[in-house]
Image (cartoon, rainbow, N blue to C red):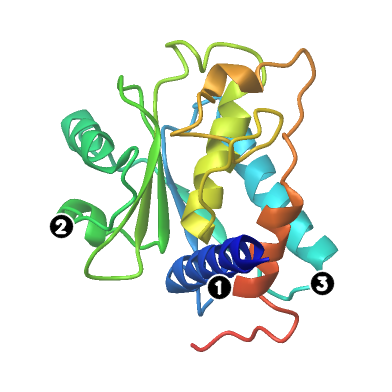
Amino acid sequence: MFHQKVLLSLLLLLISAACAWTMERAWSTRPTVLVVASDTDPRLPMVREAVEFWNRTFTELGTPFRLGPMRQVTAAVPVEVLQDLSTRVVGRGAPVDLPASVQDLPGDMVLVLSQGDFVSFAARSSSSRKVLIGIRSDRLPPLTLPNVARNVIAHELGHALGLGHNDDPTTLMCGRPAPCRPSLFQSPEARFFPLTDHDKALLLHMYPPTWTSRD
C-alpha cells in the first residue's frame, strides 16, 4: 500500500509538472504565422495543410483557439543561423536568443522553409513570444520521402503550440529521446499522423473552451 501511494504521488507530480511546462508555452493571443520561403517552394501547400490540420484539431476539441492568419515572404534567414540554432535547441527545448534578423520579422511563429542541412526544430525566443521554426531542405533525406515533409512541418508547429515529444512511433509528436525519426512519417498516401489522447488533453489544458485572446 505504501509503495502504491508513493507511485501515485510521483505520477501526480509528473502530471502537474507537464501541465506547468505546457502552460508556460501556451499562447495568450492568436499567433500569426509567417512563412519565409521562395514563391515556388513545393512545401508551401504543406504548410497551409499543416495549419489547417491544427485548426481542425482545435475545432474538434471545442476550443476557440486558432493559428493564423498566415502570410508568406521571400526574405532569407541564413543557413548558418538555422544550423546553429538547431544544434542548440534539438533535444533540449530551452528558450534561446534569436538573432535580430529573426526578431524583426513580422510574425509570432516564423516558419523558414530552408534548403540547408540541419535537424528541423522549433526555437522559442528567450526575450519575446516569438517562435522560429526551421525546416531542413526537401532535397535531402528524409524529407525526400513521400509524406515526410508535411508531417515534419506539422510536428514542429506542434512544438510551437506547446507540445513536447512522446514515444509512440505511430503518432505525430513522437521524438527524442525515443528512437523516433522523421523517416517514420513515410507513407504512400498524403496524411497527417495522429495525436495521442495525452496530446489532446494537454492542448485542452492550454487552450480550454473558455480561451479568449488577451490582445
63 is higher (above) or lower (below) than 35:
below
199 is higher (above) or lower (below) than 114:
below
Q: Position of residue 212 (x, y in %)?
A: 63, 86
Viewer-proximal residue among 6 and 109: 6
Q: Amino acid at mark 2?
A: Ala
| Residue lying farthest to the front in this orientation | 1
> Which residue occupies 27% across, 58% down?
95
186 is higher (above) or lower (below) than 94:
above
Q: Which mark is residue 100?
A: 2
Q: Position of residue 130 (x, y in %)?
A: 35, 63
Q: Secondary structure at mark 2?
A: helix
Separation of marks 2 and 1 at Cα, in angstroms: 23 Å
> Which residue occupies 53% across, 48% down?
157
Separation of marks 1 and 3 at Cα, in angstroms: 16 Å
Q: Which mark is residue 62?
A: 3
Can residue 55 be seen at all in this image of the molecule?
no
Q: Secondary structure at mark 3?
A: loop
- Nearest to N terminus: mark 1 or mark 3: 1
Pointers 1 and 3 in contact (C-beta within 8 Å): no
Where does label 1 land, which residue? 30
Q: Secondary structure at mark 1?
A: loop
> Which residue occupies 56% across, 50% down?
158
Separation of marks 3 and 2 at Cα, in angstroms: 37 Å
Viewer-proximal residue among 211 and 16: 16
Q: Amino acid at mark 3?
A: Gly
> Which residue occupies 71% across, 29% down?
170
Pointers 3 and 2 in contact (C-beta within 8 Å): no
- Nearest to N terminus: mark 2 or mark 1: 1
> Which class describes the residues within 10 Å of circle 2: few (<14), some (14-19), or many (20+)?
few
